[in-house]
């Protein structure tokens, strides 16, 4: 409800003109970070120019501490399936590690890699591959039982 609305508004404000897409599905907020601004090809080292974007994200995540943070890595279909799965997991771990370094409690973080299994576009063009190389951060409300 309102809590996620306020968090979404703050994220949209912080991430304006960074290349990160903010999408909302119900109470879940999804931040889609294109690989071309996040990582070099075949690397899980975060681009130095992307630290400021992750800093903005972490400020909001720390402020809104009643959310779970799922960090998911994705790749295009170039290379072997096992390599892509490993690379996607390493990229998600890099982002998750950076968020932990910004005082986000590890208990709030879940990290996963999907490799090439969840493309957003066809992998038969350079543009499609670029879209598929990404990290997504999904913010889920913590609900009391």
Image (cartoon, grey):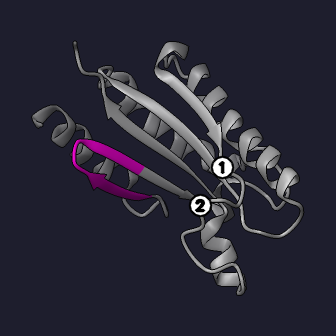
- Number of callouts: 2
Query: Which disc is residue 129 wearing?
Result: none
Residue 54 percent across, percent down from the top left: 53, 40
Q: Residue at x 31, y 23 (%)?
A: 63
Residue 16 percent across, percent down from the top left: 36, 59
Q: Is residue 110 magenta?
A: no
Relative placement, left or right, of 38 versus 144 is right
Location of the C terminus (image quadrant): top left
Residue 4 percent across, percent down from the top left: 21, 37
Q: Residue at x 33, y 46 (%)?
A: 29
Q: Is residue 22 magenta?
A: yes
CB atoms of marks 2 and 1 within 8 Å: yes
Dot 1: few (<14), some (14–19), or many (≥20) neighbours within 10 Å? Answer: some
Q: Residue at x 70, y 61 (%)?
A: 116
Location of the N terminus (image quadrant): top left
Q: Which residues are magenta?
A: 21-30
In terms of depth relative to the viewer, which is nearer, 62 or 86? 86
**Main SS category, magenta section:** strand
From the image, tell me which residue sits under label 1.
114
Cα separation between marks 2 and 1: 7 Å
Q: Residue at x 43, y 42 (%)?
A: 138
Dot 2: few (<14), some (14–19), or many (≥20) neighbours within 10 Å? Answer: few
From what the image shows, is residue 12 above or below residue 103? below
Furthest residue in direction left, as rendered: 2
Q: Secondary structure at mark 1?
A: loop
From what the image shows, is residue 106 above or below residue 64? above
Q: Quadrant of residue 74?
A: bottom right
From the image, tell me which residue sits under label 2.
118
Q: Secondary structure at mark 2?
A: loop
Residue 107 percent across, percent down from the top left: 50, 13
């Amino acid at each position: 409800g309102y809590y996620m609305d306020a968090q979404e508004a703050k994220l949209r404000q912080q991430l304006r003109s960074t290349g990160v897409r903010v999408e909302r599905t119900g109470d879940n907020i999804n931040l889609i970070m294109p690989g071309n601004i996040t990582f070099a090809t075949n690397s899980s080292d975060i681009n130095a120019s992307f630290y400021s974007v992750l800093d903005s994200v972490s400020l909001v995540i720390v402020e809104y501490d009643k959310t779970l943070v799922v960090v998911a890595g994705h790749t295009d279909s170039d290379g072997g399936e096992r390599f892509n799965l490993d690379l996607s997991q390493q990229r998600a771990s890099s982002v998750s590690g950076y968020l932990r370094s910004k005082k986000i409690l590890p208990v709030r973080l879940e990290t996963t890699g999907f490799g090439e299994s969840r493309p957003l576009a066809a992998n038969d063009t350079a543009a499609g591959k670029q879209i598929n190389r990404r990290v997504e951060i999904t913010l889920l409300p913590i609900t009391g039982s």
